[in-house]
Image (spheres, rainbow, N blue to C red):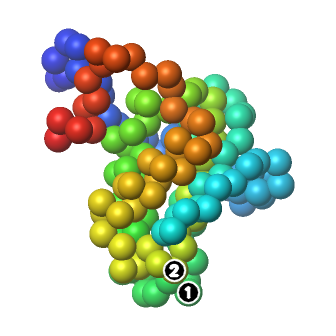
Amino acid sequence: MVRPGRIRLRFPKTARLSRASEFALLKTEGKSWTGKHLTLATLARGEETRIGIVTARRLGSAVVRNKIRRRIREIFRLNQHRLRRGLWLVTVARSSSVGASYDDLLRDWLRLAERASIFLPRHPDAEDPAQSL
């Protein structure tokens, strides 16, 4: 049970992009921003914010790719309450993400999200649950 006033930070399968047609639509109609470790593509679509994660085989073994995917999912999970509703996001891991720490990926993703203007307007007295962990 969640205490009143707390934000529930879940990441259900319904919040994930999984079809090739969804990724293709985002690639053709969306806008993208490239950072040091990640590329972020966005498209205003639907009612719920959904994310897709791309880790190509050239990044390394399945263990390496899954580690990167887990980190990106966690970054999204902790920051999803700050995002505007109705967005589709695709985060593509670049080759430099293999050696990057979680903090490096977090900084890069947050910087790209700021550049993409996908965050809700921030209230000055609002507490950020991602920072209190």
Q: Is residue 25 above or below residue 9?
A: below
Residue 124 placement (x, y as % from top left)? 34, 17
CB under 8 Å between callouts 2 and 1? yes
Residue at the image position 41 percent from the left and 30 percent from the top: 81
Residue at the image position 63 percent from the left and 29 percent from the top: 86
Q: Is residue 121 above or below residue 18?
A: above
Residue 32 falls left or right of residue 80: right
Q: Secondary structure at mark 2?
A: helix
Residue at the image position 44 percent from the left and 48 percent from the top: 110
**Residue at which label 2 appears:** 95
Front residue of this view, candidates 32 and 88: 32
**Picture disc at residue 58:** 1
Task: Single out the residue that lies furthest toward the right.
Answer: 28
How much space separates mark 2 and mark 1, taking CA atoms?
Answer: 8 Å
Residue 31 placement (x, y as % from top left)? 74, 49
Disc on the earlier residue, 2 or 1: 1
At label 2, counting other C-alpha atoms closer than 10 Å, the crowd grade (few under 14, some 14-19, many 20 or more) is: some
Residue 121 placement (x, y as % from top left)? 49, 22
Q: Quadrant of residue 33?
A: bottom right
